Image (spheres, helix red, strand yellow):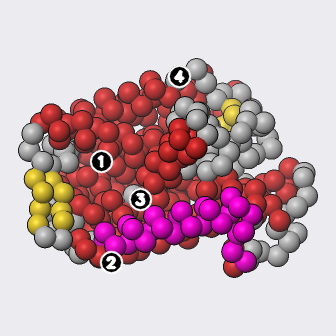
């Protein structure tokens, strides 16, 4: 836990410094209050990726001093993560970097990790055996698309204060737990470092949103999540590949379903932003009834009250993944159960038939 606390404390302090500098200098402030996916009422610095990256780097240096054997792995992981971070940070500062270019940079980072870390998806566990993926022309694109997709998925769910951060922390702690169980020191330390940095950022992001992850922070955390899940599964054959699938299923399925909805239901580009993600619907059709006033303070309360719904929902996948990390059949069953639950809940909310038990807050 040394790595976690060093990362947490350094990120908490660095994030506070970044908040003060950004507000003083007017740097990378999110001033678009009327966008379809905007749910805040004042300008907020959106460069949370900067202190997270710096804290991860600092904590990694301390961890390498204690465990020199993990140095090549950690250094390579951070170097690859920096590439994924760069496109998002450029967007956070300029607002002019196309999603396709950010995605290409993340794919480049995944390609580099493929060679430096041997992070490749070369098997798929099934209840009756193992399906081997050996042809490089299959393994390489599948690996790159999977990792880049996870990074983009974390960016997709970063819609409310604390949502993507807390969901990522839960996933990272699960990775750390399983890595501890099987003795994978590198994944254990790396997961704790990233979880600690994200937690240090979270205390300034939730509930009042003094700073946002931004595209840089979301891509960086998402990339590291994807790589660590891939490495844990591929380096340790006893961990089912369906553990990673179930662990990451909430942001992954949210992204896939959003792309399907935009392309085939609405006839629009899958890259076109809209305001009908599951978290957006919960905000508009459930939480808004608990805090009905229109002023900024009420908007902040609604924002903060939305995330816990999705934290709990994501635990429907994270907890069984952590418990059944060896059992392929159970993991597959829980994947199907999660997808069914998601589709049922989405359909109920979008048709104004939200389950009564979702309205557990008193109206303010």
Residue sitting nearer the eye, 152 or 83: 152
Task: Give the x, y percent position of residue 201.
Answer: 55, 51
Residue drawn at (54%, 53%), measured in percent from left and top?
164
Res 28 quadrant in image: top right
Q: Residue at x 55, y 70 (%)?
A: 312
Residue beneath disc 1? 227
Residue neighbourhood size for the residue with mark 4, other residues' Cα within 10 Å, grouped as few (<14), some (14–19), many (≥20): some
Q: Residue at x 90, y 51 (%)?
A: 295
Query: Compared to 171, does 38 lie above or below?
Result: above
Q: Is residue 278 left or right of residue 331?
A: right
Residue 249 tag number = 3
Counting residues from the start of the chain, the first of labels 4 and 2 encountered is: 4
Between disc 3 and disc 1, whose residue precedes?
1
Numbered disc 2: secondary structure: helix
Q: Per the image, is 348 magenta?
A: yes
Which range of residues does the magenta coloring cover? Answer: 331-356
Q: Quadrant of the N terminus?
A: bottom left
Q: Is residue 155 magenta?
A: no
Q: How far apart, in angstroms, are the residues tagged by discs 1 and 4?
A: 24 Å
- Residue assigned mark 4: 97
Observer able to see residue 184: no
Residue that badge 2 annotates: 323
Between residue 43 and residue 51, name the one nearer to us.
43
Tell me the quarter of the picture where residue 127 sits: bottom left
How many neighbours does mark 1 have within 10 angstroms: few (below 14), some (14-19), or many (20 or more)? many
Q: Residue at x 51, y 69 (%)?
A: 341
70 left or right, relative to 270: left
| Left or right of residue 122, residue 226 in this image | right
Q: Answer whether labels 2 and 3 touch (C-beta < 8 Å).
A: no
Name the secondary structure under disc 1.
Answer: helix
């Amino acid at each position: 836990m040394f790595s976690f606390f060093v990362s947490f404390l350094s990120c908490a302090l660095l994030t506070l410094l970044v908040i003060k500098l950004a507000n003083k200098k007017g740097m990378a402030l999110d001033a678009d209050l009327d966008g379809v996916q905007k749910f805040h009422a004042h300008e907020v610095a959106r460069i949370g990726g900067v202190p997270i990256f710096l804290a991860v780097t600092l904590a990694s240096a301390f961890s390498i001093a204690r465990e020199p054997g993990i140095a090549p792995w950690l250094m390579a992981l951070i170097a690859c993560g920096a590439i994924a971070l760069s496109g998002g940070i450029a967007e956070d500062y300029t607002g002019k970097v196309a999603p396709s270019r950010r995605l290409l940079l993340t794919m480049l980072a995944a390609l580099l990790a493929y060679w430096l870390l041997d992070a490749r998806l070369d098997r798929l566990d099934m209840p009756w055996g193992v399906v081997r993926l050996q042809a490089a022309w299959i393994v390489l694109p599948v690996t790159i698309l999977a990792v880049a997709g996870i990074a983009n998925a974390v960016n997709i769910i970063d819609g409310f204060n604390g949502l993507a951060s807390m969901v990522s922390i839960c996933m990272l702690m699960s990775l750390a737990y399983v890595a501890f169980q099987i003795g994978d020191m590198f994944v254990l330390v790396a997961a704790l470092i990233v979880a600690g940095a994200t937690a240090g950022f979270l205390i300034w992001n939730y509930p009042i949103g003094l700073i946002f992850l931004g595209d840089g922070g979301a891509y960086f955390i998402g990339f590291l999540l994807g790589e660590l899940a891939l490495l844990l599964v591929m380096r340790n054959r006893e961990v089912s590949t369906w553990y990673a699938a179930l662990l990451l299923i909430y942001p992954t399925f949210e992204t896939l379903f959003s792309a399907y909805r935009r392309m085939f239901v609405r006839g629009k580009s899958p890259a076109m932003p809209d305001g009908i993600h599951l978290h957006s619907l919960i905000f508009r059709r459930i939480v808004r009834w608990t805090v009905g006033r229109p002023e900024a303070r009420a908007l902040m309360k609604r924002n903060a009250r939305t995330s816990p719904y999705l934290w709990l929902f994501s635990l429907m996948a994270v907890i069984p993944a952590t418990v059944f990390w060896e059992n392929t059949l159970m993991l597959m069953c829980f994947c199907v159960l999660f997808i069914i639950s998601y589709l049922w809940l989405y359909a109920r909310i979008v048709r104004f038939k939200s389950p009564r038990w979702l309205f557990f807050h008193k109206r303010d």
